[in-house]
Amino acid sequence: MGNSRKLRRSLNAGVVAAGVTGLVAAGLGTAAAAPEGKILSADTPNAVDGSYIVVLNDSLNASAVASKASELAGKFGADVSSTYNTVLDGFSLEVSEAAAKRLAANPAVDYVVQNQRVQAAETQSPTPSWGLDRIDQAELPLDDSYTYNTTADNVTAYIIDTGVDLAHEDFGDRVQPGADFVDGGGDGDDQQGHGTHVAGTVAGSEYGVAKARASFRCGCSTPTARARPPASSRASTSSPRTPRVRPSPT
């Protein structure tokens, strides 16, 4: 009899212990995950791994930036690389992606952006056209130079116009044949001039905005631009690409 009572007590204790263990495990399984925010400019080709700029909310006093930066970085065992309190209030640091996402969700943080690698700009001077000189500066007078930090080598431009002079020296081997909607020739070669002018503004090595490496496809879309004067008239001009278009019938 005594042994039976002891056995029942042991079994009851085991059931209670198992129940408590199950409740604890269930509680751990449903614990809320730490909130995460979005990292701006993450995973771009020029992103610097593990390096971030944290911009604080405007409500923070500029004199408190350094202390707030140390406080937030310390939560993740990180050191503050730099602090900013002029153009913006914030700081930079090196942490894991997960830590950066948690920082982005902090109420004191406006946003987190991943650091990027940039390249030195190039300058073309003097400029061959007023247009190039004008687009890279907001203030006058013009400085007769065009400064740019990319040649847009990852861009394909589509020129839908009168076609493009495929052999023009400013384009090199970057012109890819497009569609010819005039006579179905398929090469998109320019017989009028305007399309070549537009393509040169976009990607010519001399007059272009996207300099040396942007590739582009051309297409002819204006039938009147392909109309050519009689052979006798063409023979009198020094250039076969001089714009001469027959007027459309009225």
Image (spheres, rainbow, N blue to C red):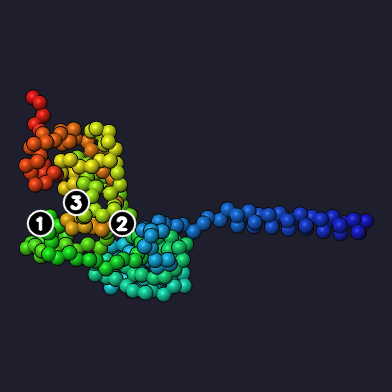
Mark 3 residue type: Gly
Q: Are marks 3 and 1 in contact (CB under 8 Å)?
A: no
Label 1 secondary element:
helix
- Mark pair 1, 2: CA separation: 24 Å
Horizontal arrangement in the rendering, residue 14 relative to residue 181 (left or right): right
Taking the spot 30% from the left edge, 49% from the top edge, the residue there is: 156
Between 39 and 149, the one nearer to me in the picture: 149
Between 228 and 95, the one nearer to me in the picture: 228
Q: Earlier in the sequence, mark 3 or mark 1?
A: 1
Which image quarter is the N terminus in? bottom right
- Mark pair 2, 3: CA separation: 16 Å
Which image quarter is the C terminus in? top left
| Residue 102, picture quadrant | bottom left
Residue picked out by circle 2: 153
Mark 2 residue type: Asp
Q: Which mark is residue 38?
A: none
Between 100 and 247, the one nearer to me in the picture: 247
Q: Earlier in the sequence, mark 2 or mark 3?
A: 2
Q: Which mark is residue 130?
A: 1
Residue picked out by circle 3: 200
- Circle nearer the viewer, 2 or 3: 3
Horizontal arrangement in the rendering, residue 29 relative to residue 88 (left or right): right
Residue 162 can be seen in this image: yes
- Mark pair 3, 1: CA separation: 14 Å
